[in-house]
Amino acid sequence: MAGSTVPSKVQESPEGDDVARRLLGSAAQLAYDPATEVDWDTPLDKDFHGASPEWCSLYGTAYWGELTEAQRKELTRQEAASVASTGIWFEMILQQMVLRDIYMKNPAGAEFQWALTEIAEECRHSIMFARGAQKLGAPHYRPRRAVMELGRAFKTLAFGEAAYAAILVAEEVLDVMQRDWMRDERVVPFVRTINNIHVVEESRHMKFARDETLKRLEGAGWARRQINAFVVAVASYFIVTSMVNPKVYRRAGLDRKRALAAAKANEHHKSMMRSSCSGLMDFLASARLLTKPALAFYKRANLI
């Protein structure tokens, strides 16, 4: 990727160390251990949703109106588990990209130590998501094989701003959903705790990703911005469109074909995605990463 040619002075920037030191301080003061913070022992209460109903892919459709409350709650639980499984998949990609990025950096530096701290948090998040999905009664949802292979290529080839901007998009889209879910008393309590932990700790990761994206773009020419804007948009499209696995509908006892058609045409869900991503799109525009080819993919993913 064009972002791989990063000047050495950027790699060891004092400004980057300042940000990293602040994030290390935050992590020291406010961090969670999901193994003890989340109530894993209480049996699942099926009177609760797994996510805010308004975020369900079928909410507002005629099909949603036909479902019983039990079916609606089961569907939101399955969709929450699917989102968590997609989160695990991308967190594994993220960890590998960050490790590769710091490979040659000074281990005594704050940036190096913050990166390892972020990876440690992501490892805990992945275990937390896996246990949460299991408790919700969901199978192992994963993106399509072709998307998994594209992810394999992306984690191997993406560098610099392409890597960090894609990390930011994935984290911010998940963040806006989970901020709603963690405050919603209709959502099962242990999922609300998971969401709260993730939101608090991911706020540090998003700060770092924004800072790194802007830093790596300093002095970038037109061609480099065009290439990386396109790469980030394509990666974002596959991440966002993989969040709700089509298998959730059959698992919830619905007609899969009808549910897929209703979800695809659901203007309410598209509007939720667009409105929640306005701040993210403003950032990408300010970084000059909203090129015409990139915009086409963000529109297809209903992010703009």
Image (tube, rainbow, N blue to C red):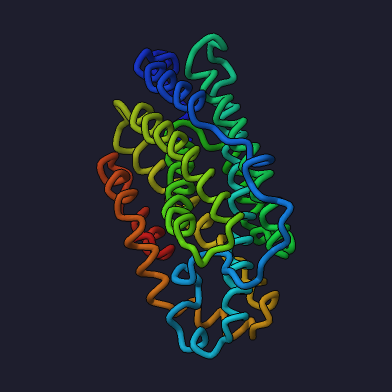
- The image quadrant where one finds the C terminus is bottom left
Q: Position of residue 136 (x, y in %)?
A: 68, 62
Q: Is residue 269 visible?
A: yes
Q: Position of residue 302 (x, y in %)?
A: 39, 65
Where 204 falls versus 22 (above or below)? below
Q: Is 25 on the left or on the right of 131, as rendered?
A: left
Q: Is residue 156 visible?
A: no
Name the residue nearer the viewer: 90 or 69: 69
Which residue is painted at 61% across and 67% down in the image? Answer: 77
Which residue is painted at 57% across and 69% down in the image? Answer: 49
Q: Position of residue 167 (x, y in %)?
A: 48, 41
Name the residue nearer the viewer: 108 or 187: 187
Q: Is 267 on the left or on the right of 4, as rendered?
A: left
Which residue is painted at 51% across and 23% down in the image? Answer: 28
| Quarter residue 61 falls in | bottom left
Q: Position of residue 129 (x, y in %)?
A: 64, 50
Name the residue nearer the viewer: 161 or 54: 54
| Figure label count | 0
Q: Is 273 on the left or on the right of 102, as rendered?
A: left
Q: Is 272 on the left or on the right of 90, as rendered?
A: left
